[in-house]
Image: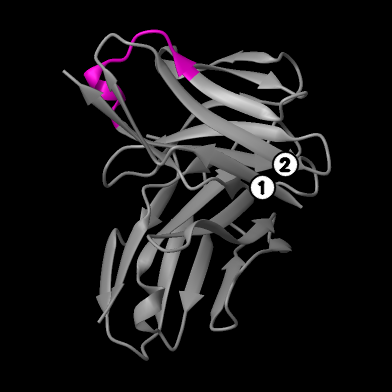
Amino acid sequence: AQSVTQLGSHVSVSEGALVLLRCNYSSSVPPYLFWYVQYPNQGLQLLLKYTSAATLVKGINGFEAEFKKSETSFHLTKPSAHMSDAAEYFCAVSGGFGNEKLTFGTGTRLTIIP
Amino acid sequence: DSGVTQTPKHLITATGQRVTLRCSPRSGDLSVYWYQQSLDQGLQFLIQYYNGEERAKGNILERFSAQQFPDLHSELNLSSLELGDSALYFCASSIAGGSYEQYFGPGTRLTVT
């Protein structure tokens, strides 16, 4: 069984400040981890993925995430927030081949303060 | 634009009715997934098809069914609709067997009145 926990359903940061969205996972097999972003009234857009190649993963729009097995974490960061980053962010886990379904966290709504 | 298309975008119907949601995956993708997003349950996996065959099942109600056709498009059928079925239904597609990222369509917003 797999699950993810996103700490903080709402996060507010000032424009230009560091963005840190937290995700912890639980998985009985080596996990594949993803971050998706959802803008209002839109579908989910893939930001980045971890598939065991490199622990520091770079994604689109300046986001990156680091896989830490010892902490079972996959936190999402961006050095400098932009107003356009305001959205809902979802962490998700899958088990890879034969177990490809995504199990999502409850989401974190990111607000950017001008 | 993810390349995944879903129709219709919005659907309003009454309790007890039946509806069909349609999804066309990205060109070359063999796997199609259906997810339901609601305020109380969040994003939940419903069902996966791979190259026409059912591959995995999640928390899908017996009133719901799906299929994937030879041209790889998929349909999700929802019957005997209840108020609680009101939600956003997403389709996603992936190559399957590759790096497993899924690309999501814009969703169908279903409102049951």
In this view of the protein, can residue B96 be seen by the observer?
Answer: no
Q: Quadrant of residue A42?
A: top left
Quadrant where the image shows the N terminus of chain B: top left
Q: Tell me which label, 2 or 1, sits earlier in the chain.
A: 1
The residue closer to the viewer here, B57 or B49, is B57
What is the chain identity of the residue bearing mark 2? A
In the rendered structure, which amino acid carries the disc numbered 1? Answer: Ser
Closer to the camera in the image, B112 or B24: B112
Quadrant in the rendering for residue A81 = top left
How far apart are the two marked residues, 2 and 1, measured between alpha carbons?
5 Å
Please say if B88 is above or below B62: above
Q: Residue at position x 48%, y 17% from top?
A: A77
Taking B78 as reference, is B58 above or below it?
above
| Residue occupied by mark 2 | A26
Judge whether residue A36 is colored magenta: no
Horizontally, is A72 left or right of A35 in the view?
Answer: right
- Please provide percent x and percent y for residue B65: 57, 76
Provide the secondary structure element on which disc 2 rests: strand
The part of the chain drawn in magenta is A77-86
Horizontal and vertical percent position of residue B62: 60, 82
Residue occupying image coordinates x 72% and y 41%: A26
Q: Residues within 10 Å of mark 2 (few under 14, many from 20)?
A: some
Chain letter behind tag 1: A
C-beta proximity under 8 Å, tags 2 and 1: yes
Residue B63 figure quarter: bottom right
Residue designated by label 1: A3
Q: Secondary structure at mark 1?
A: strand
